[in-house]
Image (cartoon, rainbow, N blue to C red):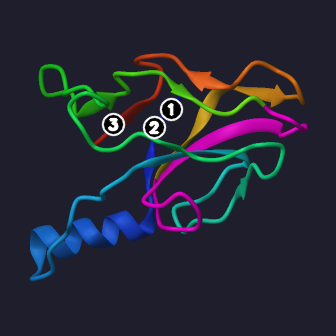
Amino acid sequence: MGTQQASDYLEGLLVGHLFRTATMAKPAALWVALFTSAPTDAGGGAEVTGGAYARVNLPPSDANWRAPVAGDGTTRNAVAITFAVPTANWGTVTAFGLFDAATAGNLLVWDLLVTARPVISGDPAPSFAVDALSISVG
């Protein structure tokens, strides 16, 4: 993964919270999504659909996300993130995103995968191993 992109939605929340009078509530859940065509900061992209695909919830928690090391501004998944076994072809997965809802919702961050991967019906469940998904701030 390269440099994660904060969505326009998240950037607006942060600016409003830090520099203006708005407040920002922590999301109750964080949903990891897979894309066959990457979104932009404004959203969009082509999220995987069908074939038993569903976003995976990895809520904000010290048990789920690692603390930054020596002020590097990066968190990593502390547990494996495992999607369902595909029951149809999902296409070539090229990117991931984090949302605040299981469906629809607001895109928070996204990034391209280091290596795009075709996901075929009957493949083992796609997953991110522990520490494989990193989110950097700054």
Q: Residue at x 80, y 33 (%)?
A: 86
Residue 115: x percent and y percent?
Answer: 69, 23
Amino acid carrying label 3: it is: Ser
Asked whether residue 92 is drawn in magenta, I would say yes
Residue assigned mark 2: 3
Mark found first going from the N terminus, 3 or 2: 2
Residue extending farthest bottom: 21
Asked whether residue 34 is drawn in magenta, I would say no
The mark found on residue 136 in the picture is 3
- How crowded is the residue under tag 1: few (<14 C-alpha within 10 Å), some, or many (20+)? few
Mark found first going from the N terminus, 1 or 3: 1
Rounded to the nearest angstrom, the CA distance separating label 1 from label 2 is 4 Å
Rounded to the nearest angstrom, the CA distance separating label 1 from label 3 is 10 Å
Say which element carries label 2: loop
Q: Residue at x 50, y 68 (%)?
A: 105
The mark found on residue 2 in the picture is 1
Query: Is label 3 in contact with label 2 (beta carbons under 8 Å)?
Result: yes
Query: Is label 1 in contact with label 2 (beta carbons under 8 Å)?
Result: yes
Q: Is residue 101 above or below residue 38?
A: below
Tell which tag, 3 or 2, sits nearer the viewer: 3
Magenta range is 86-108
Amino acid carrying label 1: it is: Gly
Rounded to the nearest angstrom, the CA distance separating label 3 from label 2 is 7 Å
Q: Is residue 79 above or below residue 74?
A: above
Say which element carries label 1: loop
Q: Residue at x 82, y 21 (%)?
A: 123
Amino acid carrying label 2: it is: Thr
Residue 103: x percent and y percent?
Answer: 58, 62
Quarter the C terminus occupies:
top left
Q: Residue at x 60, y 24 (%)?
A: 127
User: For this view, does 110 lie left or right of residue 37?
Assistant: left
Residue 117: x percent and y percent?
Answer: 77, 26
